[in-house]
Amino acid sequence: MLVNGIIVVLLALYLVWSGMAAGNYTLRVLSIAGIYALLAIGYQFIFGHAGALALSQGTFMGVGAYASGILAVNYGVPFDLALPISVGLPVLLALIVAAPVLRLETHYFALATLIISQVVLLIAIEWISFTGGANGIGGVPPIRIFSVTIPPGWPLLATVWGFVALGALLAWQIARGRLGQAWACVRTAPSAAAAIGLDASRLRLTAFLLSAAYAGFAGSLYVHALRVISPDVLSFPIIVSCLTIVVVGSRLRPVGALLGALLIILLPEWFRDLRDYYLLAYGCILLLVVVIAPAGLLGTLELLAGRLLPASPPPAPSPRPLEPSAVRGVAVKTPEAAAAPVLDVSRLCCSFGGVRAVDDVSLRVMAGEALGLIGPNGSGKTTLVNLVSGFYVPDSGRIALCGEDITGRSSYRIARAGVARTFQTVALVEDMTALDNVSIARDVNRIGLGAALRVGLRDPVQTRAREEAAFLLEQMGAADAMMRPAGSLPYGVRRRVEIARALAVQPTLMLLDEPAAGLNETEQSDLAQRLRALLKQGTALLVIEHNMSFLAPLVDRMACLDAGRLIAEGTPQHVKSDARVLEAYLGTASELVPA
Ligand code: ADP
Ligand code: MG
């Protein structure tokens, strides 16, 4: 915060000083730098926050520029009145591009955005009667706002940087709260995000549309500042500059984008005397920044400031017990539903290539019951949990939750319906505090752009979610770790944070994948005790575990998988002494820790 403030003040002083002292050429260059800053602040949403490599940011800027320029030259529409179209059109284009590809892997997304860039460039060059073709269109009027024309020189500089300040503030407001944390989840721990009910596609779409809106706005400023429309604005170097600004400045912070934009636009000016060697020097400096400051200039400055002036962590919130959640989709609505098993899996099959990972498995878990799932490594236990929680789609069979068929539903919707899970390998957002790793799982259906824009300096939803998270962490015996980044915590504590996060979903069914792995005996019995308390509240539990001394006293029933098939089911005593179970474990007997 302090570093950001200092940089903003220094930048403002620099701009004011230049505005008074510099010639028209420098003023123009600084205005262009401001426009790039806006473009890059927008790009931070999709590239930084959502973590998707979009190569269309320059195209959105170009579409905004063409829209505003053509409206001004051909129809006499001024800058401000054209904004709904010059911002709306790139947003619409983003929506069309995103619809089919946001769900896909990020390299498909990169490719799709690259293709759309080429298509738009081709249209701009070929549709000569409308766009002026390769020559473009001249005679674009200057910016006009509320009938006031902004002349070139310092008024243009002040106007552009005024918009930059507004754009940066808006971007900060959007990302500083729960929406920003949700993006961090989707970006750095996508499976965890799905497991707590975050809709990754929608979050990514929000980021992409915001990027396009900023780009469209930057484009219309650009065309009125340059006073010509030309296909150059659609060319590849724009996206390269934009990427460079964000990587050099900061991927997430608006202030970093300002810093990066000024640097990238001014460097060529500073090195102009080098003539032919300029590109070499420019390249070396960029490379140096990327190598020395991988977190970007701003991130590195913040890191240094943090070392020099370590800030005391904010006070931990006071714990507040959870009230019944409003998130639940499958409520126990009717007496029949109340009597139905919480989880009813029938004849489930799932293959990978030739491997039948889960083969005709049927299981039931009732409310308040714990089912232990055992089986040698590779027997399909994790796959079963992945199927129930919607991470995999079964080839055949049916999964019902409280009597409602949830087969084939996406994982985030199953989480919202009341299924929480943990992972065999702990999945937490490393940079976020343990507290926020848990608090983000509360009220996920209230996370969105609208909510982010509405909150004041303090967000009551977040305050409450944090108090509830504090309560859950305390219940799991991880209260001391609350304010520390999850990445800095010891393994056992991370496991407990993950279980606390699963509890934040207020699950009717909880799926735990080897929760005792890596815990010492005291920690194990502590965990078992906490899980038993949970069962008393009526939660259904499915626990995968090899460790019999942990599992046998905890669960009511046990089931054993072998090569995807259910080979035994019954009381722990019965399953442990079953001949087929012993045989299945024979080759790997060391895994079955005896009671
Ligand atoms: P367990 O959890 O019981 O150790 P898993 O459910 O992880 O076993 O794996 C069961 C089988 O399914 C293994 O042979 C594994 O290689 C295979 N498998 C699991 N997930 C995948 C996947 N995403 N792609 C291909 N094979 C998989
Ligand atoms: Mg497993």
Image: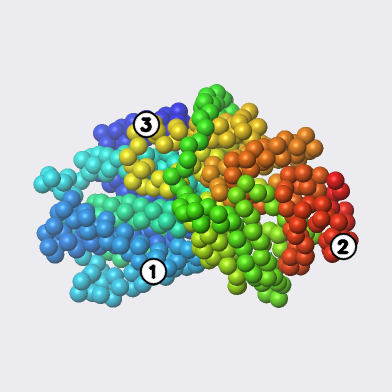
Q: Is mark 3 within 8 Å of ligand 1?
A: no
Q: Amino acid at mark 3?
A: Leu
Q: Which residue is mark 1?
A: 116
Q: Residue furthest front?
A: 335
Residue density around tag 2, few if under 14, some if 14–19, many if 20 or more, within 10 Å:
few
Q: Amino acid at mark 1?
A: Ile
How far apart, in angstroms, are the residues tagged by discs 1 and 3?
39 Å
Q: Is 61 left, or right, of 417 in this rendering?
A: left
Which of labels 1 and 2 is toward the front?
2
Q: Residue at x 66, y 65 (%)?
A: 362
Residue 543: image x %, image y %? 69, 51
Residue 457: image tag: 3
Q: Which residue is mark 2?
A: 579
Residue 412: image x %, image y %? 50, 55
Q: Is 578 left, or right, of 436 in this rendering?
A: right
Residue density around tag 3, few if under 14, some if 14–19, many if 20 or more, within 10 Å:
few
Residue 406 vs 474, above or below: the answer is: below
Q: Residue at x 53, y 66 (%)?
A: 408
Of label 3 and label 2, which has the lower sequence position? 3
**In the image shown, does 531 or 8 lie closer to the viewer?**
531
Q: Is 247 left, or right, of 553 in this rendering?
A: left
Of label 1 and label 2, which has the lower sequence position? 1
Q: Amino acid at mark 2?
A: Ala
Which of labels 3 and 2 is toward the front?
2
